[in-house]
Image (tube, rainbow, N blue to C red):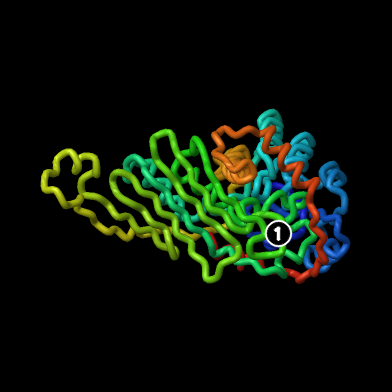
Amino acid sequence: MEQVRIGVIGLGMGFSHAKSLAAGRIAGARLSAVCDFNPAKQEMAKETLPSDVRIFSDVDAMMTSGEVDAVIIATPHYGHPQEAIQALNRGLHVLIEKPAGVYTKQVREMNSAAAASGKVFSIMYNQRCNPLYKKLRELIADGELGEIRRMNWIVTNWYRSQSYYDSGGWRATWSGEGGGVLINQSPHQLDLWQWTTGMMPKRIRAFCAFGKYRNIEVEDDVTAYAEYENGATAVFITTTGEAPGTNRFEVTGDRGKIVIENGNLTFWRLRVPEPEFNRQYTGGFGEPECWKCDVPIVGDNPQHNGIIQNFTDAILHGTPLIAPGEEGIHGLTLSNAMHLSTWTDNWVDLPLDEDLYYDLLQERIAGSNAEKTVREIGPVDMSKTFGAY
């Protein structure tokens, strides 16, 4: 294969991917087809995309058309695992949008299908391309921070108005989206939290507020506390109802502290590791000498195109994936645990009880009273949603 023929399923977020492919921004790939059940979006595709791009209203028809070698799945969240399994079973390579799904039990089935297929399977964790987080991961993996003791992430610059929630009938509902800020806005942070540190917690206690700031039934304000096997702790705070917001990720180890904020990475480096200083120091009041290091960040963030290019290169050349699809379950585990902790008003041990989570989610779907008057807001510049990264 010299060129990967890619079909895009879902022309919401997926439309920006389709335009990038159609514009030739992905070397070795071309847009061959798109699919959406909405006639208005089909018409938009017809008016905007090249004439040789086939437009489908049925997913299976596109998958079996012989027109595509791979698909990008950009449909509402519940559909990601179902459509990925369908594509993998059809012999197609798959790139799914985040999140991997709504509940881990569903995603585990998708991962099994991917492993059995032998096809390339990736997830749109485009912030793994961000040189800020790549550098943080590198410094931690190389031991520069020592043993991690504490993590704090405040990500509250996800402001969303009521008009945003009213723009789609599936948005902010248990049956359509499967959650709120944890499942829609924060999956990137939940992925980066464990990807950069290489650590998953052993248990989580969370407090989710549902419809605190907006007329929605899902969570729009979350504070969570996590504990790790080595004694480290973490706090994760997110909301869509505050302005102005903050995005500050702080990781402390026994050799110092790293802070990512406002596009900068600052390393507060201890000259002597804290445990060593504590053993040797006899002066009472005092603390280790500390150097403030503004770490230079080299390279641009190619965002979504970086993941699509990597996906294409993996198909054509066997290039290792930046974001293997199987890893989508990790961040989803964190969000599922936060929901479950709130629903049961208790700690949740990891791995979590997937059957209990599923049962309680079904209760919320069955008890949903969401009735929405959908107010379309027209084409949206999705680049404006990247600010919280």
In which quarter of the view is residue 340 placed? top right
Q: Is 19 located above or below residue 80 in the figure?
A: below
In the image, taking residue 343 as reference, residue 376 lies left or right, namely right
In which quarter of the view is residue 48 placed? bottom right
Tally the marks: 1
State the residue lying farthest toward the left.
283
For the question of whether residue 291 can be seen, the reply is yes
Q: Is 25 located above or below residue 313 in the figure?
A: below
Residue at horizontal 68%, vertical 47%?
96
For the question of whether residue 314 can be seen, the reply is no
Residue at horizontal 39%, vertical 37%?
231
Rendering coords of residue 170 (x, y %): 77, 56
| Mark 1: amino acid | Met
Rendering coords of residue 139 (x, y %): 37, 47
| Residues packed near mark 1 inside 10 Å, few (<14), some (14 to 19) or many (20 plus) | some
State the residue lying farthest toward the top.
116
Q: Could you say which is closer to the camera, residue 48 or residue 348?
A: 348
Disc 1: which residue: 13
In which quarter of the view is residue 212 placed? bottom right
Q: Secondary structure at mark 1?
A: loop
Image quarter in which the N terminus is found? top right
Rendering coords of residue 364 (x, y %): 75, 46
Q: Could you say which is closer to the camera, residue 22 or residue 260?
A: 260
Rendering coords of residue 161 (x, y %): 66, 69
In the image, taking residue 152 as reference, residue 18 lies left or right, namely right
Residue at horizontal 77%, vertical 52%?
176
Residue at horizontal 52%, vertical 49%?
224
State the residue lying farthest toward the front.
345
